[in-house]
Every structure is written in structure tokens, then in C-alpha cells.
Image (spheres, rainbow, N blue to C red):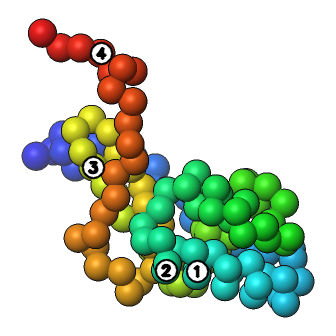
Amino acid sequence: MFATAVRYFSKKPKPKMKPIELKTPPEQTQTITRAIFDILKEHGPLTVSDTWERVKEVGLRGLTSKRHMKIVLRWMRERQKLRIICNHVGPQKQFLYTTWFTKPSITKMRPTNESSRPKLP
């Protein structure tokens, strides 16, 4: 029991992360967040790359890159406009962004290439 207590108190605490402050004007931020929210609401739980593909199809001018979109998604999560679902199948994890109103039982797996997986005997 003493060893468990020593291990517990020897760990450093997780560093506090400051809230994200977006540098875009509020009108542009509102346009971007509304478009992303509508995409996620319409097409269900999506990964970051699937969301980026949908955003490119829509043609948002405010988003400059995929990295910028990830920052906006994190900002939306902080304000509890979105949430993340972890879809854990086998050794692979998949994090899906969704709205708060989507049921968690609705999960979507990305089609995987069977030839890239190693064959087990």
C-alpha cells in the first residue's frame, strides 16, 4: 500500500490548458461554426478528415487549412457545441465528431483496405 501511495504522489499533474481564442472576426467565426455544425448534423458522426472533405465540397472561405478547422472544432467542443465519440473496434480507435443531439449508438466505420492488413494464419 505504501508503494501505491508513493507512485500516486510522484506523478506530475496534467498541465492546465488555456481556452482557445480564435483570431477570426466574430461574424466569420459564426459562419464557419454554423457551416461545420450543419455538416455534422446532416452527415452524422464524422472523423476530422471526413469533415475536412465535406467542408472543401461546401467551399467555406473562412477556413484556411485543415489545421485551422481542427482548432475551430476544439473551440466548438470547449463551448459544448460538439462532442467526440470514440469508436473502438479491435486494435484501432476512431474519434468521431458529432452534435450533442446525435444518439451515441449511431457510429460509422470508415471503409478499410483489406489488403493493407496483415494476414493471420
Characterize the local packing of mark 1: few (<14), some (14-19) or many (20 or more) Cα atoms within 10 angstroms.
some
Q: Quick one: label 4 or label 2, which is nearer the N terminus?
A: 2
- Residue on which disc 1 sits: 37
Q: Which of marks 3 and 2 is in front?
A: 2
Q: Which amino acid does label 1 sit on?
A: Phe
- Residues at marks 3 and 2, CA–CA distance in whole angstroms: 22 Å
Residue placed under numbered mark 4 in the picture: 118
Q: Distance between the residues labelled 3 and 4?
A: 19 Å
Q: Where is residue 104 shown, x and y percent of the image?
A: 28, 73
Badge 2 crowding class, 10 Å Cα cut-off, few under 14, some 14 to 19, many 20 or more, is some
Height in image: 31 above or below 77? below
Most distant residue in the front direction: 57
Kind of element beneath mark 3: strand
At 58% from the left edge and 82% from the top edge, which residue is drawn?
A: 38
Q: Quick one: label 3, few (<14), some, or many (20+) residues within 10 Å?
A: few
Question: Which of the labelled discs sits on residue 41, or is there none?
Answer: 2
Q: Which of 105 and 77 is in front in this view?
A: 105
**Of pointers 1 and 3, the one earlier in the residue sequence:** 1
Dot 3 corresponds to which residue?
A: 88
